Amino acid sequence: DILQWPQISKCRSPEMETFSCFWTAGNFYNLTVPRMLQLLYKKSNEEDWKECPDYITSGQNSCYFNASYTSVWTPYCVQLASKNEVYDKKCFSVDEIVLPDPPVHLNWTLLNTSQTGIHGDIQVRWDPPPTADVRKGWITLEYELQYKEVNETKWKELKPRLSTMVPLYSLKTARDYEIRIRSRQRTSEKFGEFSEILYVSFSQIGIGCDHCTEEVEFPWFLVVVFGVCGLAVTVISIMLAKQPRLKMLIFPPVPVPKIKGIDPDLLKKGKLDEVNSILACHDNYKTQLYSDDLWVEFIELDIEDPEEKNRASDTDRLLSEDHLKSHSCLGTKDDDSGRASCCEPDIPETDFSASDTCDATSDSDQFKKATEKEEDLLCLGRQDNDESLPNPASTDLQSRPRNTQPENSNVWAPFEDSIESPHLSVHTQISNQNSLTSTDFYAQVSDITPAGRVVLSPGQKSKLGRAQREGCTEQNFTMDNTYFCEADVKKCIAVTSHEENEPHVQEQGYNEDGYFTTESLTTTVANFGASTAAPPSSEMPVADYTSIHIVQSPQGLVLNATALPVPDKEFNVSCGYVSTDQLNKIMP
Amino acid sequence: GLLLVALLVSHMLLTKEGVTSLPICPNGSVNCQLSLEELFDRAVKLSHYIHFLSSEMFNEFDERYAQGRGFIAKAVNSCHTASLTTPEDKEQAQQIHHEDLLNLILGVLRSWNDPLIHLASEVQTIKEAPETILWKAVEIEEQNKRLLEGMEKIVGRVHSGEVENDIYTPWDGLPSLQLADEDSRLFAFYNLLHCLRRDSHKIDNYLKVLKCRLIHDNNC
C-alpha cells in the first residue's frame, strides 16, 4: 500500500455564509481513536491557531464553520495536524471557495407539440438551492442544464444562464428524457453538484405517439439524386471544356479586326504619322521602301490586261478620266501579283501597304478612309488641278508653270505637307502636262524613309515649270536633290536649282520634313538603276521616269525607253537625265 | 496573433454581457435623468465586469508567474483597503445602513483609483507580460473610473444629507512594484492582483445587496 498522509481534500462554502473543510485521514495511522487529527485555523489578522469549532455537522473528517466563524473576504489558513505534526495546510478566503448546492424542485411543462406529433417543446423550471440567499442578493447564481435521452450516454449541455427556467425544443415525444441541473456562483468557474435527475416522459401526459417510431432516416434517395446531377453537370462541363467544336458551337468566337502590330485605335484616330511609322516598320514595307521604283510598283500594272499594254505611257492612262475613275489613281487594278499591293481596285486612294500577304485589307480600308481628306496625293491629276493638291501646292504648281528656280523650293514645301501622309509616291499634276505627252507627269519618289517620309527626286522641270536638273557630271555633289545616275551607279547631282538656288535647295535638301536627297538611296536602287540603264545605253537619253514595260518580280521592273529625241551631245549620256534646258532643246 | 484573436473574441463575449454603454437620454434632452433602478443596473453590470476581469487577470498571472514560487502560501496578507471596516458577512451587510454602505463602496473605489493607474503602467514593465494581462489592467482602470462616476451619481440621489468624502485609504505599494529583484517584484504584483480580485468581489456583492434592498425590496 502506498503511504498516504492525511490531507485536506477541500474546503467549501455553499452560500458564502458558512464553510466546511474536509480531509482524508490516510493510512498512516493505525490509530483507532478518531480525531487524533486536529484542524486548526487562523484568520489572517490573528496570531493563534484555533481548533475547529464543529467536527460533526459536516460529517466525518470534516470541520464546519458556522456563520459566526465565517468572515467572507478575510483570509483563512487551516492546517491538519496532530499533536506533534502538521500534515497539511491550506490558505484561502471564503469568497473563493463558494460551491453552491444543487437546485431543487425541478419540473417540466409541455409547451407545444409539432403537427405530426413527433416532436414537442417543454419548459423546465426549478428553484435555487435553498441555502443560497438569492433573494437578498447576497449571492448570484447561474445554472447549467443538461439533458439526454434515457438510453443515451452523453449529456447535452445548455449554456449557463441566470434564470431558473429554460425551454427545451424539439424533443421526441416517443422517447423519454433525463434532465439535471447544477449551479455556480456567477463569477466562479466551478459548479456545484448536480441536482436530482428529472424524468420527462410524454406518454405520461398522454401525448406519446405510438406509431411515431419511424425515425427520420438519412435521405439517401435525395443524396443520390443530387449527387448524380452534380456529377453530370461536372462531366458535361469537362466535356465542353475539352471539345473545341462543342465549345465553338456554344460560344462562337468573336473576330476582332487586327493587323499585326497595328493598333486599331491609331487608325481610328487618324494619326497618320504614327501609323505611317508603324507601317514603315513592317519588313515587307521596308524592303520596298528602298526600291527605286516604288512609285512604279504602285502603279499596279496588270500585265495581263491588253488594254494596259497598249498604253503608250502611264501618263496617257492616267490622263484618261475614265480610267482614272475606274481605277485607282495609282494605276491599274490590283491583280494581287507578288508585288503585294493591297490596293483595291475601286479605291481611289493610294495604297501603300506593303505586305505581300496583305494582313488586313480592312485596316487599309480604315486607313484610307481616315486619310481620305488628305489624299489624293496620288491622284493629283485626276481632277482639276485646283483640287488635286490639298494646299497651296496645287496653286503653286499651276501658277508656276514657268517659275524661276528660286521658287522651286517653295513648291516643294507644299509637297512636304502633303507628303506627311504616308503615301509613298506623289504624283504631281501639271496643268501643262498635255504639252509633254511623252513625258510622265509624276515626280519620282526616290526613297521612302523608315519614318515614312517620301524622298523625291526632282521631277522634270518642264512639268513643274521648274528648271530641269542638270546632268550629273556638270554639278558638284551637293547634298541636294539629286538624280540617281543609273548608268554610273553614282549619284548624279542635278540641282533643282542652279547654283544661285543652292541655298534654298540646300535648305530643302536638309529639310527633314519633305524629302531627302538621293544620297540616301541604297544600293538596291543602284542595282535597279543599273538594270534600267540598259535601254539607254544608246545615246538616247533616258527620261526621268519611264513607264514599266514588264514586271518581272516584286523588285524588278523593266522600263520602256521613252521616246525622246536624241539630245545633243551636250548631254551627259551616262547620267541619263535631262535637264530642263536640255529637254527644251530636245523637245519641239 | 492568436492571442489577439482570442482577446478580441473574449472581449466581444464580455461586451455581450451588457457592459456596452446604452444610450440613456434621447437627443437634445436637457434634464435627462436616469431612474435609480437604471443606475443600479449599470453599476452592478460594471462591478460584475470589473470583478470578472480581475479574476481572470489574477488567474493568468498566477499561471504565468506564480507557479513554483510559493506565492500562495504567502498570500495571506492584508490589502491596503483592510483598514476600511466593511461588512464581512451577510448579517453585517444586512444591518449596515445603505448610505453608509454606499459611502464605503465609494471609499473602496477611490482607494483603488491610484493603484489601478500604477498597475496599468507598471505591469507593462514585467518582462514578457502577456498581452491579455496588459489589456485587462488598462480596462479595469477605465471601468473603475466609470463605476466611480456612477456611484457618485447614485450617492447623490440616495443621500439625504451631505456626501462624505473622507473614506479613503492611500496606497503606498508603488515602490514594491518597482523593486529591482524580480521575485519580490512579481510577489508584489501577485498580492496586488489578489487584493484587487477580492475587493472587486466585495464591491460587486455590496452593490447587489443594495440593489435588491433598495430597488426590489429584498425580493430579487
Image (cartoon, coloured by chain):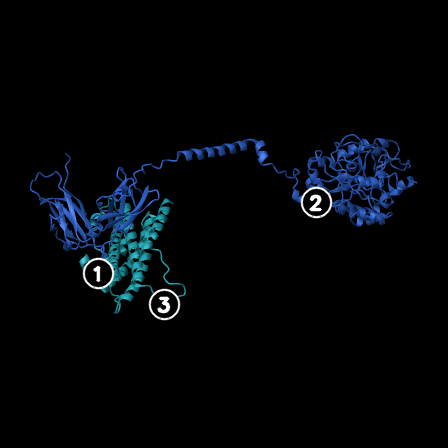
State whether residue A500 is above or below residue A138: above
Observer-nearest residue: A447 or A442? A442
Q: Secondary structure at mark 3?
A: loop
The residue labelled by disc 1 is B84
Marks 1 and 2, Cα distance to the nearest angstrom? 96 Å
Mark 2 and mark 1 in contact (Cβ < 8 Å)? no
Mark 2 and mark 3 in contact (Cβ < 8 Å)? no
The residue labelled by disc 3 is B31
Instruction: Tell me the mark number nearer the camera, choosing from 1 and 3.
Output: 3
**Amino acid type for the residue under numbered disc 3:** Asn
Q: Which quadrant would residue A537 be assigned to in this image?
A: top right
**Amino acid type for the residue under numbered disc 2:** Asp
Q: Which quadrant would residue B68 be assigned to in this image?
A: top left
Q: x and y percent of residue A42 in the render? A: 15, 52
The residue labelled by disc 2 is A273
Q: Are marks 1 and 2 on the same chain?
A: no
Q: Are marks 3 and 2 on the same chain?
A: no
Q: Residues within 10 Å of mark 3 (few under 14, many from 20)?
A: few
Specify the subunit that label 1 lies on.
B
Q: Chain B shown in which color?
A: cyan
Q: x and y percent of residue A406 in the render? A: 83, 49
| Horizontal side of residue A352 vs A405, given as left or right | left
Marks 3 and 2, Cα distance to the nearest angstrom? 79 Å
Marks 1 and 3, Cα distance to the nearest angstrom? 36 Å
Observer-nearest residue: A499 or A225? A225
Observer-nearest residue: A230 or A185? A230
Disc 1 or 3, which lies upstream in sequence? 3
Q: Secondary structure at mark 2?
A: helix
Q: Name, please, the residue furthest toward the top.
A: A552
State whether residue A10 is above or below residue B166: above
Q: Residues within 10 Å of mark 2 (few under 14, many from 20)?
A: some
Q: Are marks 1 and 3 on the same chain?
A: yes
